[in-house]
Amino acid sequence: MKIRNKKIISGLLSTVICSSVFTAVPVIADDMFILGDISNDGSVDAVDATEILQYYSDKSTGKAVEWSEEKKQSADIDGDGEILAIDATWVMMYYAYLSTGDNKQISDIRTYAECIESLENIDFGLDMPDLHASQSFDEETNELSLSWKPVDNISGYKFEFFSPEGKTEEILNDTEYKITLSENIMTSDNTYSYKITPYVDLYDVHKEPEKWINEKVNPTKIIVDSAELTPHDTYPLYNIKGDKPFYSDTYKVTDADRKIMDDFAEEHFTPYMTNYDKLEYTWRWINKNITYASGELYKEIWNDSWVSACMVKKMGQCLQYNGGLAEMLAYYGYDVYMLELWTNHAEKTGQHFRGEVNINDQAYSIEVGNDGKYSGWMWFFRPTESSIAGIDDEN
């Protein structure tokens, strides 16, 4: 979270820290003026605000009695070098704050003013739609665990959990939440979701972003993120055009391919993404950003690796689309393989390539369609019967 404070006049405050504790830095001039105490009577109250407003009014009409530099510094609450109506507002806000019974030092007023203003300028510095929580589920106890990356300089998290039974809301300081459900969500048709919103509370101001993590509990995501991984640099192609599938070829993930994927990850992924999030992002990105390379265009990529064609030249066909994602799956360590098939099996027409992944002996089909041509061909980790069941791929 980035907090941008206005520059303070040198010598009045060297550092302003926005937290629940004031930083007391007395500003006392030679004639004992202190910040906010314009009347110099030892307290900051409505009288001081009135003096500031009168000075501002008189000065705007050319009638102001000139104040000493020390008194001006005392009246310049926000430290911008000018005495304006906003300075009187800060005094009144601080006076109201003191009236609640708090006995902070008068010199704390600038810290208060700076922090209030900073809250209006809070930039959480994050791409909100790309934030995600890790999900895990214990099928023996039905305990769902959610965890997310901490955010600096916040007061807490508002956690909202939505289930068929209704909504549960809690205020959390931790970045993890566990709840025992009444059923096994891995086999249930019920929908569960959650929203996690960080917030900052400072004095009488509450600040939170417009949106934060807002996701469904996804059993497939849990499976993908909890899979045992063995990164590897080769993956096979199986031909399933006929009645019996057979091994056809082996593709290799080169050092150059890994460099391309690392560069892609650095540009597009956030620290908040799980493997499932990264793969899903890439799946959508390829769909939206790759030009279908028909005719002469295909000659520009026919000798490229799949990730080079997709992520560098941004061109391809089904082999590049699905192969590019398959390379990333292999790089991450998933048991992935490519399939060569007919889109119209009965007529043996429409040659096509797509990926399939095996996790815990369950096959999942992945299809990366093109956003224009074949735009309807899109699915991600769809459970399916294995396309290569019983195949002998010792080649």
Image (cartoon, rainbow, N blue to C red):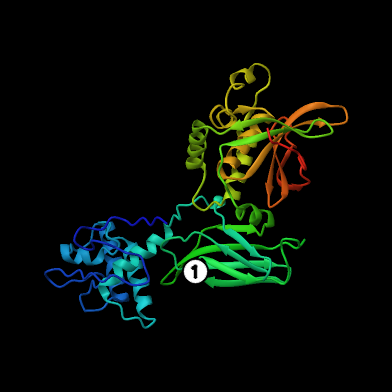
Residue 299 lies left or right of residue 39; in this view the side is right
Q: Is residue 197 above or below residue 311?
A: below
Q: Is residue 39 left or right of residue 200?
A: left
Residue 356: % across, % down: 70, 41
| Three-letter amino acid code at the position of disc 1 | Asp
Q: Quadrant of residue 25?
A: bottom left
Q: Residue furthest left?
A: 30
Instruction: Classify mark 1: helix, strand or loop.
Output: loop
Residue in view at x 78 percent, y 34 percent:
245
Q: Residue at x 25, y 66 (%)?
A: 75
Instruction: Residue under label 1, please give it.
Output: 174
Q: Residue furthest bottom?
A: 101
Q: Position of residue 88 (x, y in %)?
A: 32, 67
Where residue 309 sits: x, y (%)?
Answer: 58, 28
- Extreme residue in the right direction: 346
Q: Position of residue 65 (x, y in %)?
A: 19, 63
The residue closer to the viewer here, 148 or 339, is: 339
How crowded pointer 1 is (Cα within 10 Å; few <14, some 14-19, many 20+) is rated as: few
Residue depicted at x 75% and y 63%: 190
Screen quadrant of the C terminus: top right
Q: Identify whether 161 is placed above or below 368.
A: below
Task: Return the residue nearer the eye: 49 or 135.
Answer: 135
Q: Quadrant of the N terminus?
A: bottom left
Among all residues in the image, which is located at the extreme top? 296
The residue at 71%/50% (across/down) is 361
Describe residue 127's horizontal placement relative to residue 183 as left or right: left
- Height in image: 220 above or below 39? above
Count the numbered circles shown. 1
